Amino acid sequence: DSDAWGNLGLAYAYLENRLEAINAYTSGLKSLTSRGLSESPRLLEMRGHSLLEVGEFTSAISDYTKAIQANLKRDAHETANSFVFRAEAYTEAGDEGAASRDVATARCLYKLAKATNYKNDYQRNLGCIK
């Protein structure tokens, strides 16, 4: 279900119809939460990308932050990706300090993921958070 919404959003994004892409991702997220399921980090990131492209920096940062929180307990590498995405949003919003902190955190998480052979360790992941 969330994959279908994600694919629809990607199709709209490919056609450069960002608002319809945002609507598709939002519908997918609502579909999950209405059934008592967690929001998909993937859908949050995809919506964040489209929000960033339409200049909605605060909303994009919020989506990336939610994706970070969801990924943190699951996968250091995916969490690092979310930090990189949020760093880009902070840069676009003019907050170089926050962007720099997120890039440093992502580097730490990428190294940790590689060092642990991509096995997630929540407590060690937390050690990377600045």
Image (cartoon, helix red, strand yellow):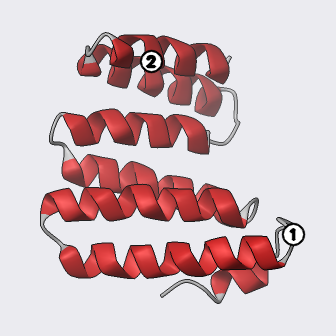
Q: Residues within 10 Å of mark 1 (few under 14, many from 20)?
A: few
Specify whether 18 is left or right of 126.
Answer: left
Work out whether 116 lies above or below 128. Answer: above
The kind of residue on which mark 2 rests is: Gly
Work out whether 105 lies above or below 3. Answer: below
Please state the total of marks drawn on the protein image. 2
- Residue at (62, 13) in percent of width and height: 4
Element at badge 1? loop
Q: Position of residue 43 (x, y in %)?
A: 53, 34
Could you say which quadrant of the image residue 31 lies in?
top right
Work out whether 101 lies above or below 99. Answer: below
The kind of residue on which mark 1 rests is: Asn
Element at badge 2? helix
Residue denoted by label 1? 117
Q: Which mark is residue 32?
A: none
Mark toward the start of the polypeptide (2 vs 1): 2
Q: Position of residue 41 (x, y in %)?
A: 59, 45
Could you say which quadrant of the image residue 33 lies in?
top right
Specify whether 43 is left or right of 12.
Answer: right
Could you say which quadrant of the image residue 123 lies in?
bottom right
Specify whether 3 is left or right of 115.
Answer: left
- Residue at (31, 14) in percent of width and height: 20
Q: Residues within 10 Å of mark 2 (few under 14, many from 20)?
A: many
Q: Position of residue 49 (x, y in %)?
A: 36, 39
Quadrant containing the N terminus in the rendered view: top right
Residue denoted by label 2? 9
Q: For marks 2 and 1, give the CA distance.
A: 32 Å
Specify whether 112 is left or right of 83.
Answer: right
- Residue at (27, 37) in percent of width and height: 51
Q: Position of residue 73 (x, y in %)?
A: 74, 65
